[in-house]
Image (tube, rainbow, N blue to C red):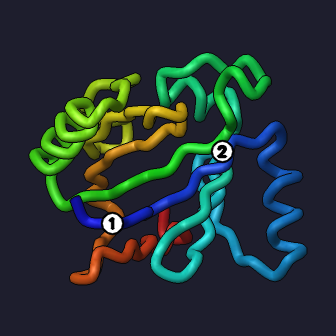
Amino acid sequence: MEQRISLITLGVADVARARAFYESLGWQGQEVEETVFFQAGGLALVLWGRDKLARDCGLDDAGTAAGFGGIALAHNLRSPAEVDELIATAERAGATVTRPPATTFYGGYAGVFTDPDGHAWEIAHNPGFRLADDGSLVLPDFSNL
């Protein structure tokens, strides 16, 4: 497995408030369908509604430390086959698959597992997000959508 984090998604109570906070720090975000994307070097920080993120990961958002923690890490890959392979490898290593790999609403392919400590990892192939040769993620220009 290549060591990579492609996106860090923060589940937030109020997307507009969270976006305003990060932009007040000097970050420049792009909003698409109630989701805010920030290019952060070779990865992206994403703000998304906490309840939506929990549902997308197949987890219960109890709002406590015992439930969903409000963060999902993402590892983007170059093909659906790589997604299947990595999810299977993680499961063999002791991960719990919370959302088996499947076609996504955005035309990609993804699944989610939690590590032994309960951290959620989305493993995804997104044809709209380019991966450079070194594996770094390059967000598209969402202003053309």
Displayed quadrant of residue 116? top left
Please state the total of marks drawn on the protein image: 2
Dot 2 falls on a residue whose secondary structure is strand
Residue 42: x, y in percent?
46, 79
Look at 53% across and 67% down and name the residue there: 44
Q: Residue furthest left?
A: 81
Look at 55% across and 70% down and name the residue there: 143
Residue 107: x, y in percent?
28, 44
Q: Is residue 13 left or right of residue 28?
A: right
The residue at which mark 1 appears reads as 3
Dot 1 falls on a residue whose secondary structure is loop
Considering the image in quadrants, where does the N terminus appear?
A: bottom left
Q: How far is the residue under mark 2 from the one under mark 1? A: 24 Å
Amino acid at the residue labelled 2: Trp
Q: In the figure, 96 relative to 29: above or below?
A: above
Q: Is residue 53 left or right of residue 137?
A: right
The foreground one among 119 and 78 is 119
The foreground one among 60 and 26 is 60
Residue 142: x, y in percent?
51, 67
Q: Is residue 103 left or right of residue 139?
A: left
Amino acid at the residue labelled 1: Gln
Look at 62% across and 69% down and name the residue there: 38
- Tell me whether the residue at label 2 lies in contact with that at label 1, contact meaning CB atoms closer than 8 angstroms: no
Q: Earlier in the sequence, mark 2 or mark 1?
A: 1
Mark 2: give few (<14), some (14-19) or many (20+) Cα within 10 Å. Answer: many
Say which mark, if any, is on residue 119. none
Mark 1: give few (<14), some (14-19) or many (20+) Cα within 10 Å. Answer: few
The residue at which mark 2 appears reads as 48
The foreground one among 144 and 39 is 39
